[in-house]
Amino acid sequence: MKKILLLSITFLIPWLTNAQPFTHADTLRGSNGPGRDWWDVTHYDLHVKFNIPDSTISGYNIISFKAKPGFPQFFQIDLQSPLILDSAIVDFGYRFYSKKIKGQTRTIVRSQRRKLNVGQDGNAWFVKLDYAGRENDRRPVLKIKDTAGFIPNLTIYYHGKPQAAKLPPWDGGVVWKKDKWGNPFIGVACQEIGASVWYPCKDYQGDEPDSASMSFTGPDSLMIISNGRMRDSVNNHDGTHTLTWAVVNPINNYDISPYIGKYVHWREMYPGLDGPLTMDYWVLDSNLTIAKKHFEDATRMMKAFEYWFGPYPFYKDGYKLVEAPYLGMEHQSAIAYGNHFDEGYLGRDLSGTGWGLKWDFIIVHESAHEWFGNNITTKDIADMWVHEAFANYAETLFTEYYYGKKAGTDYIVGVRKNIRNDKPIIGFYGVNNEGSGDMYYKGGNMIHAIRQIINNDEKFRSVLHGLSSQFRHQTVWGKQIEDYISEKSGIDFSKVFEQYLTTTKIPVLEYKTENGRLFYRWADCVDGFNMPVRIFDNAGKLKWIHPTGAWQVAGDEFNTVKADENFYVNVKETGDD
């Protein structure tokens, strides 16, 4: 098949160097290229049949969209090998004509449904807006005037054996497992690899459908769960049934997910900030007793996070916690849970302080993504710190809410041992590239430092609430979040973000003594770094200083420099000029 050539990677991202071996495929996957930027997804209507004996799937996705003026004549649809795109049908609804017949004006209705030509370039499939099957006929099917008054649909049919997850949720795909009784236990974890590993979509994080419907077919002896609320259940009279779930809020591609297994269910109503919230729990039938006790952390989580972040963002779709055949994922309104009903992270405390064993890590961390990751989603995974830094800091806020500020401080300081400083937290834009895993622990410590500098917890909490409301159900660039925090706090944090997000250097608070006087400055920092910090005076009390890159003299109340542990900095005595 003839391939469609896109803009070169060096044109799209001129600051790449030879040290960054990104490919044409990376650009197709990570950029809002010419096959994507002219149309916005409004709705997915996904239909998938799971054929468990041979680990294959088949189905179709009806993608509703809005077109923008001046678009090229092709869609980019993403579907990863070895899945096969069978055909593409575009449906522009109906066109209406007025025509006089025997002296009377009649309305003529003509369907605008066409099969389209498809080309392939790796995992990107290009659906071309010309008539399929007509040699030398390349008249465009869609003109901008055709989209007035209705939303057209593109239906993609596909089938095949999807990639099986190797180490979910990190090395993801479809998870084909069995429970301890030998029943099928199936799920999907695809954040890093992309939703196109199991269904055709516009696999670009910057464009979310405004709503979605998911119809999944599988054995009628098993329950099938997905995001949002169940809309329909159909017995197919062939040993299978089809269950339809739907969300009425925007949802990112990787959050759409099925769970298939021998599930049981219970529900409670939570008196939330926006009214009664349904909280549903689905676990394997053999785990019902332990889960009913253990999942009490879910309501504790909701209480703490509505306090810190504002109302749960998806009241209309509800909240669900679903046992999964892998550790966990933040699937919107259907959080995946696989932490074996242990406290901590698989029974471990990531902070080493003991506080991380007071609650279930997966329930707390993955649910925090409902606010940061699902409610607020980054357009490019290079900015994934917005998801993970806030979710990491949510662990500290949860700990503080129930066990006090000292416990929260101990926790956030404790997780610093996990920081690697291997590469910048912000990745390369446009090439599907995440930054360092330090987006978790270092990112959380950065937010903790910002909170100290604001030095007013009510204002800090109002900033968090403001983020949740200002960017509600939106996709954003990380810079928007940075600018909002600076604006609403009244403090310019641009150099703090630059230091912690774009370099691997830990700020060094250098000091020296000359003629009995103490001097201090910032070193190993970006130009203009001027973060204020608290240090202990001679009486053991914390006081603010405002270092810059130039030496400053300390007051008589200081004879050494010992920084407040709430700041992720190093302190070093030096004799340098």
Image (cartoon, grey):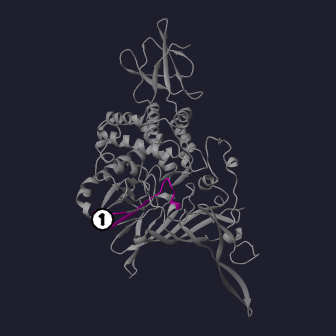
Q: Quadrant of residue 282?
A: bottom left
- What segment is highlighted magenta in the picture? 177-196
Specify whether 489 is left or right of 99.
left
Residue at the outermost left position:
289
Vertical comparison of 400 with 197: above or below: above
Magenta residue check for 184: yes
Vertical comparison of 173 with 240: above or below: above
Q: Residue at x 35, y 18 (%)?
A: 540
Q: Residue at x 59, y 55 (%)?
A: 29
Three-letter code for the amino acid on which mark 1 is drawn: His
Magenta residue check for 302: no
Residue at the outermost right position:
136
Specify whether 239 is left or right of 520.
left
Q: Quadrant of residue 352?
A: top left
* Residue at mark 1: 265
Foreground: 19 or 558?
Answer: 19
